[in-house]
Image (cartoon, rainbow, N blue to C red):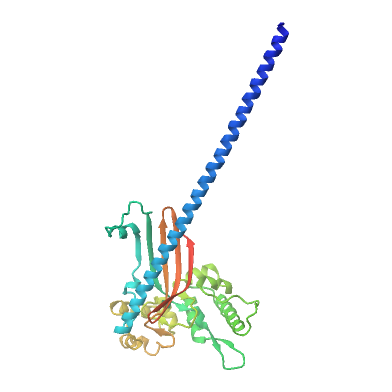
């Protein structure tokens, strides 16, 4: 074979080897891509399954914690019925639950093996919502005429005004919010069709619909609540600011003295408080004050691996019947 032909055959074989190598590289790349995609799909499915399992586990645990809080409140109501007790901050329901590992409870049972239990930490507390001024008290309905009318309750507006002054918040904001609430409630009572007014608030954050700003809401939160019916202020659990705001002749020093006295011995009746503190004479009203509560907020916080889930529930207690009014679950930090 002549040398030129040999060179041509060599070049052809070299091109074939290059094409084969390129094809092999393409096949390897394709296989690697498919393997990576399959691995990513498997990883994603595992993550989704883990997140769903955590969500279900968190729901079970937080529901159990809520049921436990309801049981405590029910037993407290039983004690109130049997012994004539008042609701105060020295009762079991008022003791917050510090963060505790759930496996620690299971370890007390010899039949349970906690080695494979997912590490979960639970904390929470129960808050007396009648320790706060009920913003919804400021509007009352009058059904005496042909149409239902909403009127502003001047004593309750005066209490909110005094609280705004204590906290150095803008009074025009309160006036506008109260007027908007009155319009909302009156229209809702007479016309079920949608209107230009805000929705009726169900929780404190909803007061933003009425024009109350975030800064004011943060300042009001320890002293104001939004409850679905008219409620009294529990003098055994209310803050000094709420107490002073609820009574026109009570200053902060006298309100603090009331708090000191109730810490020594909670008041069973309003008359008992009036006897111990002459400054309260004629200021405590059964229509606006009390020593027992029906509305409570249950706060639960669950730390599950690297996820934190928080749940807030409003419960209402009617004798021994403790029901959930609403529940709200959010991701914590």
Give x and y (percent) for residue 137.
Answer: 50, 82
Q: Is residue 134 above or below residue 116?
A: below
Residue drawn 54% across the image and 75% down it = 201
Counting the numbered discs, the total is 0
Query: Toward which corner of the image does residue 128 lie, by quadrant?
Result: bottom left
The one of 178 and 142 positioned closer to us in this rendering: 142
| Furthest residue toward top | 2
| Furthest residue toward front | 1
The one of 62 and 287 positioned closer to us in this rendering: 62
Tell me, yes or no, if residue 87 can be seen here. no
| Lateral position of residue 293 relative to residue 200, left or right | left
Give x and y (percent) for residue 112.
Answer: 30, 57
| Quadrant, the N terminus | top right
Residue drawn 62% across the image and 31% down it = 26
Q: Is residue 290 above or below residue 52?
A: below
The one of 63 and 253 positioned closer to us in this rendering: 63
Give x and y (percent) for residue 126.
Answer: 39, 71
Query: Toward which corner of the image does residue 200 lie, by quadrant?
Result: bottom right
| Lateral position of residue 264 relative to residue 136, left or right | left
Tell me, yes or no, if residue 202 can be seen here. yes
Give x and y (percent) for residue 333.
Answer: 46, 57
Query: Toward which corner of the image does residue 91 lie, by quadrant?
Result: bottom left
């Amino acid at each position: 074979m002549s040398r030129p032909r040999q060179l041509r055959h060599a070049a052809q074989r070299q091109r074939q080897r290059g094409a084969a190598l390129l094809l092999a590289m393409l096949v390897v790349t394709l296989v690697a891509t498919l393997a990576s995609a399959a691995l990513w799909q498997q990883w994603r499915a595992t993550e989704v399954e883990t997140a769903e399992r955590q969500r279900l586990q968190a729901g079970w645990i937080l529901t159990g914690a809520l049921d436990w809080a309801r049981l405590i409140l029910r037993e407290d109501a039983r004690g109130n019925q049997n012994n004539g007790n008042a609701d105060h901050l020295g009762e079991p329901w008022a003791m917050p639950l510090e963060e505790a590992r759930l496996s620690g409870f299971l370890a007390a049972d010899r039949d349970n093996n906690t080695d494979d239990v997912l590490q979960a930490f639970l904390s929470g507390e129960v808050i007396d919502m009648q320790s706060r001024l009920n913003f919804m008290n400021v509007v009352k309905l009058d059904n005496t005429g042909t149409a239902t009318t909403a009127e502003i309750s001047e004593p309750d507006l005066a209490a909110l005004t005094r609280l705004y002054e204590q906290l150095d918040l803008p009074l025009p904001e309160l006036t506008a919010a109260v007027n908007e609430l009155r319009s909302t409630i009156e229209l809702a009572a007479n016309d079920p069709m949608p209107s230009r007014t805000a929705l009726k608030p169900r929780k404190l954050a909803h007061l933003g619909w009425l024009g109350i700003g975030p800064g004011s809401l943060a300042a009001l939160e320890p002293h104001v609540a939004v409850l679905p019916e008219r409620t009294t202020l529990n003098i055994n659990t209310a803050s000094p600011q709420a107490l002073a705001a609820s009574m026109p002749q009570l200053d902060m020093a006298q309100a603090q003295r009331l708090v000191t006295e109730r810490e020594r011995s909670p008041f069973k009746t309003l008359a008992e408080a009036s006897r111990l503190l002459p400054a309260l004479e004629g200021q405590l009203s059964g229509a606006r004050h009390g020593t027992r509560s029906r509305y409570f907020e249950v706060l639960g916080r669950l730390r599950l691996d690297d996820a934190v889930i928080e749940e807030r529930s409003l419960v209402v207690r009617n004798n021994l019947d403790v029901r959930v009014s609403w529940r709200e679950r959010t991701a914590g930090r």
